[in-house]
Image (cartoon, rainbow, N blue to C red):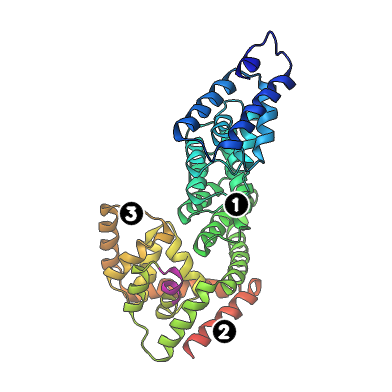
Amino acid sequence: MINEIQDHTTSGSIKKQLRALTRISDLFAAGSSHYSEQQIELFGEVFKTLVAVIELKTRIKLARHLATSPDAPAALVRAFAFDEAIAVAAPVLSQSMVLSEADLAVSAGIQSQGHLYAIAQRQTISEPITEILIHRGEPRVVHAVAGNSGARISDDSFCELVARSAADAELALRVGVRHDIPRHQFLKLLETASASVCSKIVSANPQFADAVQDAVTGVVDDINLQVRDRSVGHAKARRKVKLLTRSHQLRETNVHAAARAQNFEQMVMALSILAGCPIEMVERAVLHENPGVALVLAKAAGCSWATAKLILLIEAADRRMSGKDLDRARESFERLETRTAKRVLEFYDTRRSTRAGASIPVVSALSAEQTALTG
């Protein structure tokens, strides 16, 4: 059968080659459970040899045939997966359940963007594989991963997606509609997207810059309120902080403990009460790339540097501050007076009240939440 496949003088027909290779595959599948390790290795070498010499059209047809077969020889499927021709590799990379996690990881790590795009089409994709796809992938690959509901995405990968969304409106939309996006990443995505919208509108109407920013902020607040209300993590944090507040036990230590435990929801909820400001303002401050915004909030809430440092290092913000960055932040924090920090927050709140008409649902809902927690 091997001679029949390789001898082009007697087997010029694609059908004949395909039939011969299929017979070898069937032979392997029929006895694979009884073969020794050496015999399986021998078949693997045979498959590699055959794939290297048979015509492209034959490889494409067989790859399509084996892609959906649960009993396909792993060695042959693997050989097709690493074929340089996308038409051969794509069917098995996108569909075959015979390929192992290790096979997919190696392929995603070294092969072309076409191979990565095929992997991104799989019905389910694990976090380690999506991390490679997102890190190595060009826009088409990343869009496919973000739009694949069966792809599991880690928090770090969501962070990368959000960062790339700043210059990619289509990607921002795909990431934003995912049901599994962590809320803190969703908030950062909203801020990034709103900045993009603002820059386009302001460039055409610079005289309306403040009004545009206020209007977009109001829309973001409305969306954020809806997402927050559906968040299980937020509801749990809200209940805990509510109990602490009503029993007059809410302290800086609660913020400190929540930040150390990387509990974003509980940390921002406690800060909101201690600083006396709307929760969406706290979320923006904590997630803002400029650490000075979070320092003002921490100082207004009566936090020490030890707690402020943990707020700056919260993983949700992804600041990755160096030792020198933290030293400068500490100097700024220690120079900042509490009354100054509170005046900054008051100024922000006053400015928000001037546009209350554009965001009445948000203002009233936030007021109700503050009352429920402190009343």
Q: Give, as a three-letter code, the residue at label 1.
A: Ala
Front residue of 210 and 338:
338
Image position, residue 375 (x, y; %):
49, 91
Spatial separation of the CA atoms under disc 2 and disc 3: 36 Å
Q: Mark 1 points at which residue?
A: 172
Spatial separation of the CA atoms under disc 1 and disc 2: 31 Å
Residue 339 falls in which quadrant of the image? bottom left
Residue at disc 2, secondary structure: helix
* Quadrant of the drawing holding the N terminus: top right
What label does residue 368 carry, if any?
Answer: 2
Image position, residue 30 (x, y; %):
61, 37
SS majority, magenta: helix
Q: Can residue 340 be seen in this view?
A: no
Disc 2 + disc 3, Cβ < 8 Å: no
What label does residue 321 carry, if any?
Answer: 3
Q: Give, as a three-letter code, the residue at label 3.
A: Met
State whether residue 5 is above or below residue 293.
above
Image position, residue 356 (x, y; %):
61, 75
Q: Is residue 77 visible?
A: yes
Horizontal side of 235 relative to 1 (left or right) equals left
Return the disc, 3 or 1, that comes first in the chain's sequence: 1
Image position, residue 219 (x, y; %):
63, 65
Alpha-carbon neighbours of circle 1 within 10 Å: few (<14), some, or many (≥20)?
many
Front residue of 122 and 249:
122
Front residue of 127 and 217:
127
Of badges 1 and 2, the one in the foreground is: 1
Return the disc, 2 or 3, that comes first in the chain's sequence: 3
Spatial separation of the CA atoms under disc 3 and disc 1: 26 Å
Alpha-carbon neighbours of circle 2 within 10 Å: few (<14), some, or many (≥20)?
few
Q: Give, as a three-letter code, the residue at label 2.
A: Ala
Residue at disc 3, secondary structure: loop
Residues drawn in magenta = 263-269
